[in-house]
Image (cartoon, grey):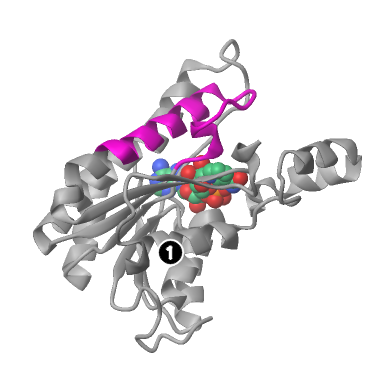
Amino acid sequence: MAERSGEGRLAGKTAIVTGAAMGLGAAIAERFAAEGARVACLDVKAEPNEARVAAIAKAGGEAISLIGDVGDAEDTARMAEAVRERWGRIDVLVNNAGVIPSRETVIDTTEADWDETMRVNVKGVFLMCKAVVPVMVRQGGGVILNMSSVTGLVGLPVRPAYSASKGAVAILTKQMAVDFGGDNIRVNAINPSFVITEINRAMFDKMKAEGEPWERMLDQHPIRRLGEPEDVAAAAVFLASDEARWITGVTLPVDGGYTAR
Ligand SMILES: NC(=O)c1ccc[n+]([C@@H]2O[C@H](COP(=O)([O-])OP(=O)(O)OC[C@H]3O[C@@H](n4cnc5c(N)ncnc54)[C@H](O)[C@@H]3O)[C@@H](O)[C@H]2O)c1
């Protein structure tokens, strides 16, 4: 981990990372802290989120834990206000929290699964932005990173609600980039393909053991491997940093070439 000496690529910035307890959000929160940012780790799961904050502190970073639901307007307002009160500003918002309650076609996707996917993946981004953007406008700028997916760019099998939600996040990113460019707020999305996290590692291990499905998966990625959370975190650091100061409204595939085929 880089020293928090004020020399990191995000030195002096404050960031909120939603869904920070595990997976991509955890990697982003840890990398942001290593790059000098003060990080508010936000998640609906208290115990792993607090463990993440403790790990960041142990590595020499500065982080706080916020527990709440991105799909709940009272929670998002409360959590944004807690960060503003604590650090005075919010420079970066990473809308990473997301769910995929089912993997079925439209025929077998339940209305409840559809609603929950949209509530967390789309409304959650809207509510977090609604709570944080006024702070960014007042302070003279900021950066928003939305976690979309390759499923928001191209069709993949058996995830209609999830794909629709990630497509919505992709276009919301461009829409907000247009509204807030004049306020010096950049809004970009990251569109990963398959990234190995704790949640899906067992599924990928099973595919590997079976051989053929794993080879087919690798064939879909010109760079013949799946992603690691750190691949996504590296892109997030760049887009959040001042090096990306003229980049807004993009949906960036971080996908080993998946969407290039
Ligand atoms: N892993 C992949 O292959 C992949 C690929 C493309 C996009 N994504 C997207 O990246 C993001 C992170 O995915 P992941 O694989 O790390 O998932 P994950 O399930 O490992 O982690 C998601 C985190 O979000 C939290 N969360 C869920 N609902 C929440 C809510 N309502 N409020 C606050 N926190 C909530 C969970 O508790 C969890 O800590 C998601 O938006 C996902 O759709 C993942």
Residue drawn at (9%, 58%), measured in percent from left and top? 138
Residue at the outermost left position? 138
Quarter occupied by the C terminus? top right
Identify whether 258 is placed above or below 35: above
Amino acid type indicated by mark 1: Phe
- Region of the chain picked out in magenta, as a range: 148-175
- Left or right: 116, with 256 as reference point: left
> Percent x, y for residue 56?
47, 75
Identify whether 71 is placed above or below 53: above
Residue 65 seen in render: no
Residue drawn at (54%, 33%), measured in percent from left and top? 151
**Prevalent SS, magenta region:** helix
Foreground: 201 or 229? Answer: 229
> Percent x, y for residue 166?
45, 34
Q: Is residue 198 magenta?
A: no
Residue holding disc 1: 238
> Percent x, y for residue 23?
56, 55
**Quadrant in the picture for residue 217:** top right
Residue drawn at (53%, 81%), measured in percent from left and top? 1
Q: Is residue 174 magenta?
A: yes
Residue 193 seen in render: yes
